Image: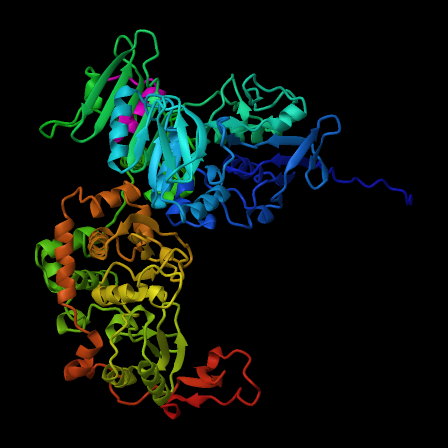
Amino acid sequence: MNSFLKVARPHRERVMKIIVIGYGMVGHKLLECLVENTRNDVTVLAEEPRPAYDRVHLTDYLSGKSADDLLLARHDFAEAHGIDLQLETRVIAINRINMTITTHRGQVLDYDKLIIATGSYPFVPPLPGKERENCFVYRTIEDLDALRTASQSARVGAVIGGGLLGLEAAKALNDLGLETHVVEFAPRLMAVQVDDGGGRILRKKIEDLGVGVHTQKATTEIVDGHQHQHRMNFADGSFLETDLIVFSAGIRPRDELAVQAEIQVGVRGGIVINDHCQTSDPNIYAIGECALWNNRVFGLVAPGYDMARVAAEHLQGQPSTKTFQGADMSTKLKLMGVDVASIGDAHGNTTNSLSYQFCDESRQVYKKLVVNQDKTLLLGAVLVGDATEYADLLQMMLNSLPLPERPETLILPAMDNAPRAGLGIDALQDSAVICSCNSVTKADLCSAVAAGNTTLASLKQCTKASSTCGGCMPLVTQVLKAELKRQGVTVNNHLCEHFPHSRQELYHLVRVGQIKSFAEVVSKHGKGLGCDICKPAVANILASCWNEFILEPQHAGLQDSNDYFMGNIQKDGSYSIVPRVAGGEITPDGLIAIGQIAKQYGLYTKITGGQRIDMFGAQVHQLPLIWTALIAAGFESGHAYGKALRTVKSCVGSTWCRYGVNDSVKLAIDLENRYKGLRSPHKLKMGVSGCTRECAEAQGKDVGVIATEKGWNLYVCGNGGMKPRHAELLASDLSTDMLIRYIDRFFMFYIRTADRLQRTSVWRDNLEGGLDYLKDVVVHDRLGIGNELELEMAHIIAAYEDEWKNAVTQPNIRQRFRTFMNSDLHDDSIRYVIERGQIRPAQAAINPAPKQQDERIPVEQLS
């Protein structure tokens, strides 16, 4: 037999070495596209000290969000996908002949394909004095850190540049508590996006916020000031004194590597690319703000994302017809709380175009349409102060949809309740791009709905539509509703088979009808005897409305196990006991009392994350005895068992801490005592921090409060758990009275409108209009229900009684606490071992000592 048989070896496809220079938002989008192909060997070289983060919402960093909150992916994203991510690494040279790059550390790395995603840099005008101390740019987290540090010793700040980025920088200075000024060379703010009429309204709204606006000002030099650090001299002879200056006068492409490597660049900068995002060297691509396509640099994130998708497919040789064909530069923003939108040919530069303009100076609203000569197509639009029509108008322009007979009705206020002219969602083709940031079409959304994504939150998670800038949210919602109706998909939000109503609808029926019992709810609005779903839900609604004792005969049978015994049942059948420790403040006598009671009844004790003490191992018949002793020591129920307010966590605040700027402990105690016993669709947690160091982790709570030099900042809809969510800033620099009014409104609006067992974070994600709508309801009272919500909360507060005090002082209720219905004995099947000096369920002991392993202690020996 021939021993030299040929063995067929499997063909090994060569791994492509890809190097990405730059790791911003567009660079990260490229990686998301590349990780789908595991044959790539990807190296990312990033100058900044952290992975890609959201620059679109950079200003939020100064409003309370952390650097980690802004990250576009988890810290381990690169490692999880086998990407070699090298932070704080600057590329200094590209060798196109040898196909290598060189870093500032001297590393030489070879590539098969190279992608330049270096973005842009802020343009600083060549002014004398531009290098002075406390002159900043506004681009990175490090820039904002430096700005925040400087602001602590400043009173006045100025921004050079009144465009999009300039007004973002002005908001940052305003948020930092500085007297803020905007200096703009052009005759109006946002000169590229809005016309004179829109600029006039925008200026008025910005000035009403306390910001000084200086247009048609050419800064000639920056010198020493008399009352402040800097004096900005203007060409017309006037000047402005300020303590710090932020340059935000536009951006320039970072094309220095292309120049070094003799890759073609534009006359005014930018790396020239073709429709596949290839440079003049076919093995090198450029994407994002460093790229120049058809003599245009695109300064928005959506075109950059498109480039990333095109480049990823092309460099991997994927069969695709996708090419980059430019991008619409329409945009919708909220600048310093002011809605501003610009669509298409906003200035009416198209030959023979016509315009319609609407201006309401009392409401400070300006709207303008630009249409073609025969008034059949929309060419552009400007919206200032109210951008409600943005989504409809954008789709009309992008898809060349026919205009109504009277185009002006698209922007005129509806009169006498007449329906507004608008876009029917059915008029959009399936190929219409709904979310330009993530290139999500109407067809993509419809397919996702058909696949079972029938809520706004799940649709966003599946398609990523409206997850970047959020401007397309109204249109995404319209598509969702229309597609559900078209496909005949019935989203049954009924509570259960016994009630043809949602929790929200039942809540309103109970409150409007003054209904006080489950029997009355069923007789008027349901059928049958109820079930384990609707009984606790209705019990919760009744408690949220009237705050009656949950163990009264008409309510007791509705409660689930935890509420029925007013304690959390544990894995061994015992219960935990959690007395309220408001704000985490407890006296030595209180600590001693808890210790003595725990010792008397043989309970396991542990300090919780909410700054109180949890006691485990009590049987049902022991609960009244233990609570009688706790009440005698001055404690109340902590409601750890209920869908109610749990804790208000606090730091020591200004009382003890040298960094504290207000008394966070007192406020936390006041808030906890105000809202204790408040029943809601899910548990509620709060936190109060005495300064921005945030020791109480307030921004991870349903309601968080942080002290400022001017009052309190209010954050809402955060949570920890399996899906952590950072709370969002609802209002700033509030007085204590106004803070409490807003919290009253927020809680009652949530209780009114949330679904069963829905946390505030999930409720917020499904809330149409998002945070802006929530601000309109709570802060601006646009629905006119603020006073009503406050009165409802006042009733709940006035009706509060300690549940456990009620239970132990009423013999007919106290007698229900029996381990066995037909006996007063304890459950001797519950046994413990001693571990680390305390009891632990015998079956849960972790590595007990050999001597203790069989020493299972009956519960009666512990008490």
**Residue 333 image-quadrant placement:** top left
Residue 625 picture location, percent across and down = 26, 86
Residue 852 picture location, percent across and down = 53, 88
Q: Nearer the viewer, residue 160 or 12?
A: 160
Q: Nearer the viewer, residue 843 or 189?
A: 189
439 lies left or right of 514: right
Extreme residue in the bottom direction:
861
Residue 340 lies within the magenta run: no
Considering only vertical position in the picture, is 107 above or below 393?
below
Residue 182 picture location, percent across and down = 35, 32
Q: Residue at x 41, y 38 (%)?
A: 468
**Residue 198 image-quadrant placement:** top left
Considering only vertical position in the picture, is 8 above or below 862?
above
Highlighted magenta segment, given as a residue range:
383-403
Q: Is residue 104 visible?
A: yes
Q: Is residue 450 visible?
A: no
Q: Residue at x 22, y 52 (%)?
A: 742
Q: Nearer the viewer, residue 693 or 795?
A: 693
